[in-house]
Image (tube, helix red, strand yellow):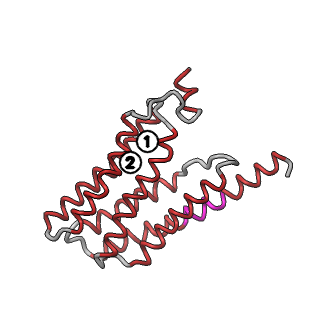
Amino acid sequence: MTETHSTANGGHGVSPWNIANVLTVSRLVLVPFFTICLFLPGTGWRVAALVVFALASLTDHLDGELARRYGLITDFGKIADPIADKALTGAALVSLSILDELPWWVTAVILGRELGVTMLRFAVIRHGVIPASYGGKVKTVLQVAAIVFYIFPGVPDLVKWTAMGAALVVTVGTGADYVVRAVRLRRLAQRVRGE
């Protein structure tokens, strides 16, 4: 009873030093190591970058699963988790663009969407929380898969572009869906308040 209550109230009473948050922080810590490996020349370093990226991406799934299953949701985790996600994805996309392996406009579209949704989330938070959608989860999987194809040496260009194209379409589509849901939430909150 106490655990459920604390979880529902943003994790009050739950220590921020729990395994879910440790995994989130570890993802942030892995970002610079991933970036360094990606920029170092040689196939071996590329494989190392891929391994680090895969490990960091795995923590994204594990931290959320552990937090929900064991009542470890905290205010720190709510803030740190999306920051860690965007740091990892952003580092990968920007690095690939700097290396001239991914067009800058692709990086700009994806990061612009992520930044826009984050700002929108904070803008409507006083009206309520917009729950994560299935499309958002698909978007994350497609982005990770596309980045893996770009990092892994020897993947045909057609495969890389197909994967990134799918990720782009879903990224933009889920961003538009988020805007629609945010507007609906705001209007509903205004009607409830009689504005």
Q: Is residue 86 left or right of residue 174?
A: left
Q: Is residue 28 left or right of residue 72?
A: left
Report which quarter residue 21 is drawn in. top left
Q: Which residues are magenta?
A: 173-181
Query: Is residue 175 in the magenta section?
Result: yes
Q: Are marks 2 and 1 in contact (CB under 8 Å)?
A: yes
What secondary structure do most residues of the magenta stretch adopt?
helix
Q: Amino acid at mark 1?
A: Gly
Q: Report the residue at 52% width, 63% height from top.
A: 115
The residue sitting at the right extreme is 194
Q: Report the residue at 55% width, 26% height from top.
A: 4
- Dot 2: few (<14), some (14–19), or many (≥20) neighbours within 10 Å? many
Report which quarter residue 99 is drawn in. bottom left
Per the image, label 2 sits on a secondary structure element best described as helix
Residue annotated with mark 2: 60
Where residue 35 appears, x then y in whole percent? 27, 63
Residue annotated with mark 1: 64
Dividing the image into 4 quarters, which one contains the N terminus?
top right
